[in-house]
Image (cartoon, coloured by chain):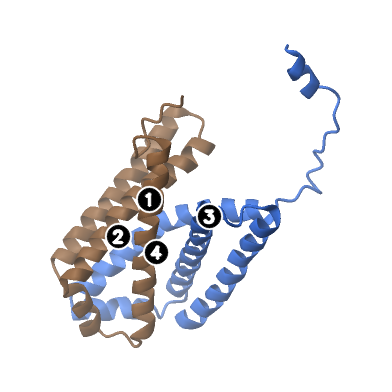
Chain colours: A brown, B blue
């Protein structure tokens, strides 16, 4: 049995499901946001600020950032375990990427909080 | 050495001519899915910084808009949109494959090529949008 201490889920099946669940959330958020910007051209500050001052959009944004944390964690784990054979280097890289995405989440909370 | 292992290690034709070995479309889709995913890990940092600036005040929103006059900024945004679209189309293909469809050689190759075609189409649209 492979010991995956650095993975996100409790097992490969758990990772599999979490990866897809987070993917669906990220796909919905991406399509909505790109569609919104494309449809409201030219985009003004009032429209943009108004979008993010609504509670559902704040929740949607934070949901997407949590999904990103899960999705990136699992994705990075899959890529690193395939290509980086040196365990200590892999650990450092995994740590760095996960901390980075945690920072994205923290920044996102502060950003939408202030709108 | 076991008998079965001996059978496997018998003299067999070895094909290692790197000049003629080509990845199938499905393999290229797979590796680019990983590449685009890692690219977006960095891209999200840029996008969050832009989100912060665009929401802070009307002045900083105008500042973000004026950033887009720069060719390099346009090119980076176009690159991010292309990577995003590619990862999204490849991901949707994965979700369909989870249901047991497109798993045969022909359908797998066809759907892999469809991902490329869709990405190129979206990438051209995104380029027209950004410029």
Identify the residue position indicated by label 3 in the image: B33
Residue drawn at (36%, 53%), measured in percent from left and top? A21
Q: Nearer the viewer, residue A51 or B63?
A: A51
Measured in 3D between alpha carbons, the distance from the residue under mark 1 to the one under mark 4, in whole angstroms, is 12 Å
Identify the residue position indicated by label 1 in the image: A71
Q: Mark 4 and mark 2, same subunit? A: yes
Chain designation of label 3: B
Residue A41 in which image quadrant: bottom left
Chain designation of label 4: A
Give the left or right position of residue B87, taking residue B2 as reference.
Answer: left
Disc 4 crowd rating (10 Å Cα; few below 14, some 14-19, many 20+) is some
Assign a secondary structure to mark 4.
helix
Measured in 3D between alpha carbons, the distance from the residue under mark 3 to the one under mark 2, in whole angstroms, is 20 Å
First reached walking from the N terminus: tag 1 or tag 4: 4
Chain designation of label 2: A
Residue A27 numbered mark, or none = 4
Residue A64 numbered mark, or none = 2
Q: Residue furthest top?
A: B1
């Amino acid at each position: 049995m492979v010991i995956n201490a650095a993975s996100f889920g409790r097992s490969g099946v758990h990772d599999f499901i979490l990866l897809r669940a987070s993917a669906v959330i990220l796909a919905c958020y991406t399509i909505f946001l790109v569609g919104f910007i494309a449809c409201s051209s030219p985009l003004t500050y009032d429209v943009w600020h108004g979008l993010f001052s609504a509670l559902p959009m704040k929740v949607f944004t934070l949901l997407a950032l949590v999904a990103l944390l899960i999705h990136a964690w699992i994705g990075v784990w899959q890529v690193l375990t395939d290509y980086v054979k040196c365990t200590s280097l892999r650990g450092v890289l995994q740590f760095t990427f996960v901390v980075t995405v945690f920072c994205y989440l923290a920044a996102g909370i502060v950003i939408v909080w202030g709108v | 050495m076991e008998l079965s292992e001996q059978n496997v290690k018998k003299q067999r034709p070895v094909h290692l001519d790197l000049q003629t070995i080509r990845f199938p479309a499905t393999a290229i889709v797979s590796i680019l899915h990983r590449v685009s995913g890692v690219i977006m890990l960095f891209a999200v940092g840029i996008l969050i910084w832009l989100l912060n600036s665009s929401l802070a005040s009307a002045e900083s929103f105008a500042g973000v808009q004026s950033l887009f006059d720069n060719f390099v900024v346009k090119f980076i945004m176009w690159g991010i949109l292309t990577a995003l679209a590619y990862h999204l189309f490849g991901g949707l293909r994965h979700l369909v494959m989870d249901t047991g469809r497109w798993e045969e050689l022909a359908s797998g190759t066809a759907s892999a090529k469809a991902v490329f075609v869709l990405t190129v189409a979206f990438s051209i649209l995104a380029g027209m949008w950004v410029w």
